[in-house]
Image (cartoon, rainbow, N blue to C red):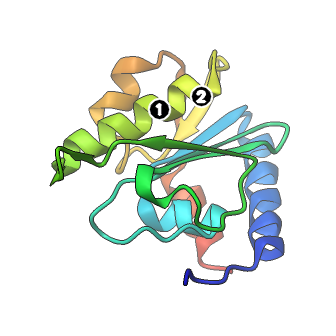
Amino acid sequence: MGLEIDKQCCRVRQQRLLEAMQQLGVDLAILTRRESVQWLTGAWVGPLFWPSAGIDSSGHVTIVLPSRKTEMPVAADTVLSYEEKWLSTMRDASEQQASSVAALLDGLGPLPSRAGCEFTAAGKSLHSKASADWQDLDATLFRLRRRK
């Protein structure tokens, strides 16, 4: 039995992030910190996995979850997956994060010229695979997450 989430509350939080994105002039926000992904979508996958999520300027939310967690309830429009294990062995954290981000970027398609992410949580894989004028969203997301 999975955890219940309040999708309506998640959608309200998504709207608040959209408003902040508009103020910052950002057309896409990519979240790679577990706590931020949970705040945005309600998805809690535990400490062993690396979800990622993106929200575009139209409010479309895409989430990437470990392959065995894709049926969990989430407030997202598109659910993608990455392989968290190879031959029943957990991949290390940096491999999981890179795989999650790669799946997200593939699912999002062409990136806008101005995108935002959590600089302190975005691995090298994000910036090396996606060229954009990146805006740091750390302070914005911390401020938004303080109010549920």
Label placed on residue 129: none
Residue 136 appearing in the image: no
| Closer to us: 33 or 71 | 71
Which mark, residue 107? 2
Which residue lies under the disc numbered 1? 103
Residue at image location 53% in from the left, 23% down from the top: 106
Task: State the image coordinates of residue 3 (x, y, percent, origin top left).
Answer: 58, 83
Asked if residue 19 is positioned above or below residue 2 in the image, the reply reads above
5 on left or right of 126: right
Q: CA distance from mark 2 to mark 1?
A: 6 Å
Mark 1, other Cα within 10 Å: few <14 / some 14–19 / many ≥20: some
Q: Amino acid at mark 1?
A: Ala
Residue 47, by quadrant, is bottom left
Q: In the displayed structure, does residue 7 sit left or right of residue 81? A: right
Residue at image position (38%, 25%) is: 127
Residue ID at (66%, 64%): 74
Label 2's element? helix
Give the residue drawn at x 75%, y 79%: 6
| Secondary structure under the numbered disc 1 in the rendered image | helix
